[in-house]
Image: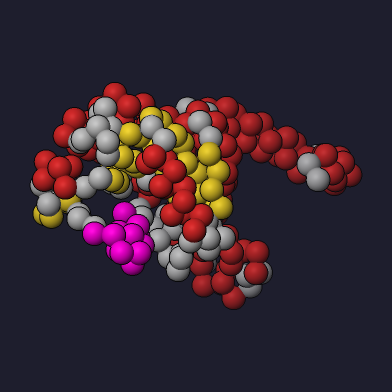
Amino acid sequence: MGRWFACFLAGRGYTVRISERDGGMPLPELAAACPVVVVAVPMAVTVEVIRKVGPLMKQESLLMDLTSLKEEPVREMLNATTAEVAGCHPLFGPDAPDLKGQNVVICPGRGESGKVWLREIMERNGARVVETTPERHDRIMSVVQGLTHLNTMAMGLAMETLGEDPAELERMSTPAFRAKQDLLEKVFGPSPRLYAELVTKNPSAREVIAAYGKAVAQLKRFVEEEDAEGLEKWLRRGV
């Protein structure tokens, strides 16, 4: 997502400078030259990078992040710098062609001008922006992302246990199954750490997994008792 936003901002006339682990502009030079610094690194090292760059920034500049969770990054940005602070969570992946119709969450931290700039550039390019607190963001993400990924993980691990031939499953698959397969390939693909952190680092994760486990246990009882009528009534409650 860091590369996506670098291309996005460069395409709108902004000068973009990049600092990476294996090269690019050193952090002190970047912080001195840039009125906006965007932290877009793996979740596991987000706090470390914030603590390094925050103290280097000018008070009138903006420090923001693109992390999928917001409570800890926003808190650390506020502690690490006197600059303006905004948490940002783009609710789409790097395969999106542009911002049109995409949801973006902004969690204001400190200052107004940086937040206004961020919101305006998002909305001007077609994004649907929601402002909320870091705490509320993480609570909603525990359902929107956490519950989605927990379900996908459970399905993938269950399929591994069942051991059916993937080729035969594909030959007899439904559109709904193929859609789930696309999610499975992402979660069990080259970056499983991203999804693992999304479901384990969220403060609301325990409540979500408890609700998920309770629902699965109830479904198990309906299946064991062959109680289609009872299951139908239960499902209607969720409509």
Q: Is residue 3 magenta?
A: yes
Task: Compare residues 205 and 59 and report the one nearer the observer.
Answer: 59
* Percent coordinates x, y for residue 33 in the rendering: 16, 47
Q: Quadrant of residue 68?
A: top left
- State the residue at coordinates (20%, 55%): 17
Check the picture and name the quadrant holding the N terminus: bottom left
Q: How is the image coloured?
A: secondary structure
Left or right, residue 86 beside residue 229? left
- State the residue at coordinates (56%, 72%): 170
Left or right, residue 169 beside residue 122? right
Task: Compare residues 218 and 56 and report the one nearer the observer.
Answer: 56
Taken as a whole, is the magenta stretch helix, strand or loop? helix
Q: Quadrant of residue 6?
A: bottom left
Q: Is residue 199 magenta?
A: no
Number of numbered discs: 0
* Percent coordinates x, y for residue 64 in the rendering: 34, 41
- State the residue at coordinates (57%, 37%): 140
Residue 106 visible in the snapshot:
yes
| Outermost residue to the bottom | 171
Task: Compare residues 159 and 116 and report the one nearer the observer.
Answer: 116
* Percent coordinates x, y for residue 135 in the rendering: 50, 28
Check the picture and name the quadrant holding the C terminus: top right
In the image, residue 184 sits, relative to residue 214, either above or below, namely below
Left or right, residue 72 beside residue 166? left
Task: Compare residues 1 and 172 and report the one nearer the observer.
Answer: 1
- State the residue at coordinates (37%, 45%): 66
Residue segment shown in magenta: 2-15
| Outermost residue to the top | 79
